[in-house]
DNA sequence: CATACTGTAATAAAATCTATTACAAATGTA
DNA sequence: TACATTTGTAATAGATTTTATTACAGTATG
């Protein structure tokens, strides 16, 4: 299901993109979003897993982009923060005795997959650099 | 933010579309989804507000489509159940002293509006009738 | 007039999201 | 070396959102 991860991650990357040479601390990043620094560190962990950023521990440590912001697209961020877009399921266990209940999740999945591809195509046209320029 | 409303509403409409002549009760509809009937009645209230269905109270009452399933698109359902698509905000009150925090929600809004339009365009091509045929 | 529905409000329970606390490990600097 | 600052991560608590439940007035059917 959808959460604030995409927005938080994009916010982090926008800041890193604004100061590409510096290691920014999670406290600083959290301050711009007005959220808790631990949340930021969790998203950074995810970003590191996808080789988007690199961190330095210890004093004067922090995080910076691992590649140019032109080489990161919003699609990368999108697929990193969601498995797929979903408009939600009515529940996980519809009634299998009903022909509609039996197939609804499968058919919703198929629909969401299509939507997901469309969104991905659209977001792949926007780089982090493009997005950052709007600030 | 996104919830199960879209899926519940689509599930309801799919069932109504399968039995276009009958008034189906909220208990029956809820049984297919395995959710509470009051939730179904709430979504039906929304559907009525948008003139998609009509209900009959009292014994043997229930709900049926107010128009042919070919005249309802998934876009109608989409815009009925969400104001707009959103991948979430990091929070509602980013730091206005930060140039990024100050503009992030505005820029996210703009991005989400674009995505929303794309999804709407895609969903407008699929009628409830099309969707129902897949069961 | 009994039965079976809708419509709606109020409340509670469950699930999810976010914040907080805590602390080990890393690392620059005096 | 000792200290300060920061990452990384786990555990817990608090807040918010979603879903379920209960309750009951109103309406139609037979």
Image (spheres, coloured by chain):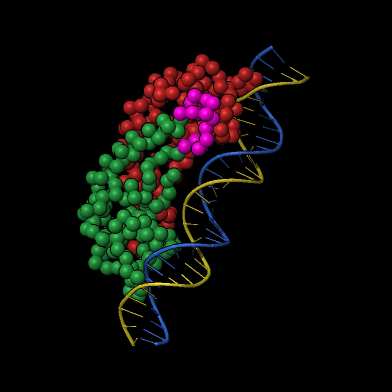
Chain colours: A green, B red, C yellow, D blue
- A98 inside magenta stretch: yes
**Residue at 34% over, 39% down:** A116
Q: Magenta-highlighted stretch: main secondary structure? A: loop
Q: Indicate the position of residue A29 as horizontal and vertical percent values.
A: 36, 63
The picture quadrant where one finds residue A62 is bottom left
> Is residue A75 something that shows in the picture?
yes
State the extent of the magenta-drawn residues as a range.
Answer: A89-103
The picture quadrant where one finds residue B79 is top left
Q: Indicate the position of residue A14 as horizontal and vertical percent values.
A: 30, 57
- A10 inside magenta stretch: no
The image shows residue B134, relative to residue A13, as above or below, that is above
Total labels drawn:
0
Q: Is residue A99 left or right of residue A119?
A: right
The picture quadrant where one finds residue B60 is top right
User: Where does the C terminus of chain A fall, quadrant-wise?
Assistant: bottom left
**Residue D3 vs residue C19, the one in the foreground:** D3
> Is residue B103 something that shows in the picture?
no
Q: Indicate the position of residue D21 as horizontal and vertical percent values.
A: 65, 38
**Residue C27 vs residue A86, the one in the foreground:** C27
**Residue at 35% over, 31% down:** B123
Q: Indicate the position of residue A108 as horizontal and vertical percent values.
A: 42, 33
**Residue at 50% over, 28% down:** A101
**Residue at 49% over, 36% down:** A90
Q: Is residue C13 left or right of residue C27?
A: right
User: Where does the N terminus of chain A fall, quadrant-wise?
Assistant: top left
Q: Is residue A73 left or right of residue A38?
A: left
The image shows residue B22, relative to residue A90, as above or below, that is above
């Amino acid at each position: 299901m959808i959460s604030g991860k995409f927005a938080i991650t994009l916010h982090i990357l926008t800041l890193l993109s604004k100061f590409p040479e510096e290691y920014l601390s999670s406290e600083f990043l959290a301050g711009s979003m007005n959220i808790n620094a631990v949340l930021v560190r969790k998203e950074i962990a995810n970003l590191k897993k996808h080789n988007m950023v690199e961190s330095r521990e210890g004093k004067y440590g922090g995080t910076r982009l691992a590649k140019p912001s032109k080489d990161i697209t919003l699609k990368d961020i999108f697929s990193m923060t969601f498995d797929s877009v979903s408009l939600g399921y009515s529940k996980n266990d519809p009634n299998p005795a009903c022909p509609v209940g039996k197939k609804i999740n499968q058919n919703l999945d198929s629909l969401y997959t299509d939507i997901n591809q469309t969104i991905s195509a659209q977001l792949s046209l926007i780089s982090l650099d493009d997005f950052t320029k709007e600030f």
